[in-house]
Amino acid sequence: MTAENITAATYLRNEPIFGVCPGPDLARLLPHVSVQTLEKGENLHIMGRPAAFMYLIIDGAFSVGGEKRGSGEGVVLDSGFLGEEAAIGMESYVATAVATRQSRVLALPASAVQKLAKYEPFQERIMASFSGRFFDSGKSHEFKNWGIAKKFFESPRVVVGWFVTLLMPLAVVGYLLSNDHTLPNEQAVYLLGIVSATVMMWVFRLLPDFIPALFAVLSAILLGVAPPNLALSGFASDSFFMALSILGLSTVISISGLSYRMLLWLLKVGPSSKLWYNFSLFITGSFLTPIIPTTNGRTAIMTPFLNDLLGAMDKESAAREAPRLSISVVSGISLFSAIFLSSKSVNFVIFGMLPPQEQFLFQWLHWLYAASVCGGVLFVLYWIANFALFRTSGNPAIPKHTVNEQMHMLGPISAPEWAGIIGLVALMASFLTSAMHRIDIPWVALAILFSLLMFGFLEKNDFRTKIDWSFLFFLGALVGLVSIIRHVELDVWLTANLTWIADFMSGNFITFVLIVAATMFVVRLALPINATVIIFASILIPTALHIGFNPWLIGFIILLLAESFIWPYQASFYAQFVSMAGHSARTDDQRVAVMHFVLFVCKIIAIYASIPFWKSLGIL
């Protein structure tokens, strides 16, 4: 097996046509390549069969197309490619290839080799090889269009979804306008109607997530709920430019092959087992949590690792392990967001709402210490739930010799990779030294993006096509929606109507946690994470201060529970992950949604388990 991989790597490097393809792409291709030996008279591929592989002749000879000529004798080839149909996107082979003597070929699967077809010289060489052997008399080879006809069971969901979406705002606005209500103004009534329609689009998944978000902002402007400069403020916010900059840096890290090199290094130092693959993704995301103060930024950095790891596995293993690996990435970057003060900008919002003496006490290290028991319990419960829900057969081990060959094929670290390393180090250094340079992190990140663009490490076409602009529109619209909520004083109205919860806070903490968890779970179906945190903190932290309860504990619980979600629209970073990872991550697997709910329950258990520790510290 080792010799076979070395042979495959050798022939990939020696074939001139592969020289036009970047090293990272060839390294990704290598695990899927195999050497096949055929005896005289054995078929390599058969006319009309699915074009699953393209072949490179190593030695021997093949007769191709004899059935088309009628004589049974075809063109005899002893070098070059066969089965090019797999690379150019045809569904089936148009001829039969038969070995005329004992022969060996390099088999390249269609799913892998088609990714190389984006390089024009490679595509031209393959097309020339194919068209030069056959004269196709105009017969078209078309793909089946599976996207036109929807599955039957999806139709009721779409019909019901649009019906509810159209009816809900009419019902909400009509009810509030025809009855006495305590809402602060008429604009708040219209905003509730807009939000109700937006949420229904998300819940029924009628459109991509960013379109309902844009609908909410546009409707608020057209109906006079908020002025345009306020409604569109999200597109000029620090969060927007921070996300744009980190996505740009992530693009350089990905397309340069740096992320793949880092992944290969992890695969090289650890055991070849699915447990290590999942643990590597989880622990790497957790390591980035206190360093990169935005979950979206960590998502942009970590998702290419998942894509590359799945690409290194065979198709069957990747499909089987993808849901669990996806959970490892998402949980690694988000599960401990409340544990570290520096993990999210909204954590500093909570920190700023604490009185001066509490701010002095709960600096970065003491914040971590106070949250440590909760984080440790979460870590244990996460892995228990992970093993319980994602038990799979087989062990998709990636052989060490294959990893070594891939590392060799990547060659030395390239200039774009060095640019990604320097950019990432500079970004992390700016986070750690922000108290010294006092420059807002988003502008440091934007300066890094500008440098990558100026020196050509991020090209114009990559900037236009590789960055997830739909997510950026989604993020900008959500930030604007939070500003609109504040503008119409909807957050103030919520504060005035939920003060009754103070009795549970001081008298029955266990029940209080359940009430907050249940309420937040429902609210998170409609509002994004930051809006939920700000609203609940605006209500509960002043209440805690009023009755003499520790405000840090209230803020911590809010941050911990607000990060929970089930569907992509509920968390912008999860929507970004789903968009970047694509269908191969299998985030539509039912176990993924169940795991998200289980983690929400685990957070409640972790809070209860931390009560004795908090009492010993005098926090509770």
Image (spheres, helix red, strand yellow):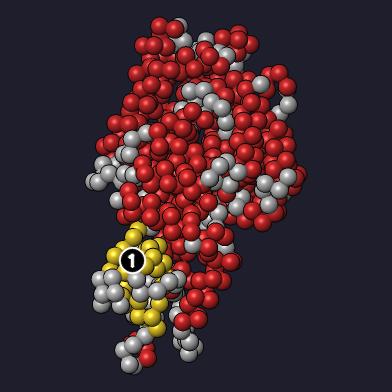
Q: Amino acid at mark 1?
A: Arg
Q: Position of residue 228 (x, y in %)?
A: 74, 47
Above or below: residue 409 compared with residue 380: below
Q: Where is residue 304? Give x, y as percent.
A: 50, 45
Residue hosting label 1 = 104
- Image quadrant where one finds the C terminus: top left
The residue shown at (35%, 31%) is: 382
In front: 241, or 516? 241
Lateral position of residue 128 relative to residue 322, left or right: right
In this view, 70 is above or below 391 = below
> Horizontally, is 613 left or right of 99 in the view?
right
Q: Position of residue 201 (x, y in %)?
A: 51, 54
Residue 212 in sight here: no
Q: Residue at x 42, y 46 (%)?
A: 405
Alpha-carbon neighbours of circle 1 within 10 Å: few (<14), some, or many (≥20)? Answer: some
Could you say which is closer to the camera, residue 37 or residue 395? Answer: 37
Q: Quadrant of residue 154?
A: bottom left
Give the answer, above or below, for where 256 lies relative to 137: above
Q: Is residue 51 left or right of residue 619?
A: left
Residue at image x 37%, y 26%?
Answer: 379
Find residue 352 and report its image quarter: top right
Q: How many marks?
A: 1
Q: Give whichever of 345, 211 is nearer the camera.
A: 345
**Residue 454 versus residue 331: which sits nearer the camera?**
454
